[in-house]
Amino acid sequence: PYCFAKNGIIDSSAAHIHPMDISLIRGYGIFDFFRTSNYVPLFLSDYLDRFIRSAAKTHLNLQFSKPELAEIIKELIQKNNLENGGIRMLLTGGVSENHFSPSDGQLFIFCEDLLFPSQEKYEKGVKLLSVEHVRAIADIKTTNYAYPVWLSTDWKAKSAEDVIYHFNEMISESSRSNIFIIKEGKISTPNQHILHGITRMRVLELAPETEIRPISFEELLSADEIFITSTTKKILPITLVDDHKIGTGQVGSITKKLMADFVEMEKMHTS
Ligand code: PLP
């Protein structure tokens, strides 16, 4: 496979990074991740906007414009014949004299295989493990996922798909997804301490009546339906939080309808 590294498209095996880059030694860098569907980079403009915004907020100098990034991505999709795959953009914090201050970082763009949850998970729903935590600089897509990587051993041991973060009794998001709850037909999603997910934004387009507001952990447990959204999970139903059954314990009708609507929306953008 080919990737973009530094200034050009090269064989992925030849890509390298300086060991003193603060991405490695301090966990300071940004990334974004999107996918192709039928060779089309789905919602590309939104992901590029978020990546550019993350760079600006972290004081990193992204030396490529939005049209330049789009051009590189188009070329990579062609060269890798990427019909249905993931694309990861990464901007490192760079190498600096004091090994702490950000400097000119390096841009990498990689193509990856996609790994979606199994059909069974979409049909039966999955479990989230609740964890008391609030993410720092939550709206920036930084490369620092040390805490959830560490947690993952525990959630897997407890047969959970992922976590739901809560703090001061209020919920925010899962480790790599946003969350929606449904109660008596009303859809709601939290608005604090979250990454503004592109999938979340598209679901809000499908269900514009959704209330965007603070949601308590108690409300989460008493919801009729819950689902999480992300680039690689799309809309994934949640039927258990810890050992607490959500609603009837089965995937609800509003979640099912939105899952179907999202499939249609994806088709519309890729054909
Ligand atoms: N929240 C966090 C912390 C994430 O890392 C992600 C995705 O990686 C999301 C939410 C979902 O965002 P998106 O729908 O853009 O994939």
Image: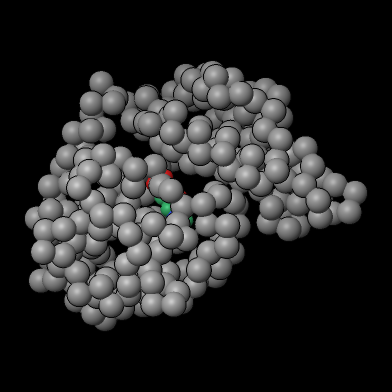
Residue drawn at (90%, 49%), measured in percent from left and top? 97
Residue drawn at (43%, 48%), measured in percent from left and top? 196
Q: Position of residue 168 (x, y in %)?
A: 44, 77
Location of the N terminus (image quadrant): top right
Evaluate whether residue 95 shows in this view: yes
Q: Farthest residue in the right direction?
A: 97
Residue drawn at (89%, 54%), measured in percent from left and top? 98
Query: In the rendered view, how is the structure colored?
Result: one colour
Residue 243 position (above or below residue 54)? below
Q: Would you say 117 lies left or right of 193 here?
A: left
Q: Would you say 11 lies left or right of 80 here?
A: right
Q: Would you say 37 lies left or right of 27 here?
A: left
Q: Farthest residue in the bottom direction?
A: 243
Residue drawn at (70%, 43%), measured in percent from left and top? 59
* Residue in the foreground of this view, choosing between 167 and 107: 167
Residue 204 position (above or below residue 160)? above
Q: Would you say 200 lies left or right of 121 here?
A: right
Quarter of the image where one finds residue 69? top right
Location of the C terminus (image quadrant): top left
* Residue in the foreground of this view, choosing between 166 and 111: 166
Q: Position of residue 171 (x, y in %)?
A: 38, 69
Residue 175 position (above or below residue 88)? below
Evaluate whether residue 18 shows in this view: no
Q: Position of residue 73 (x, y in %)?
A: 52, 24
Q: Position of residue 72 (x, y in %)?
A: 56, 22
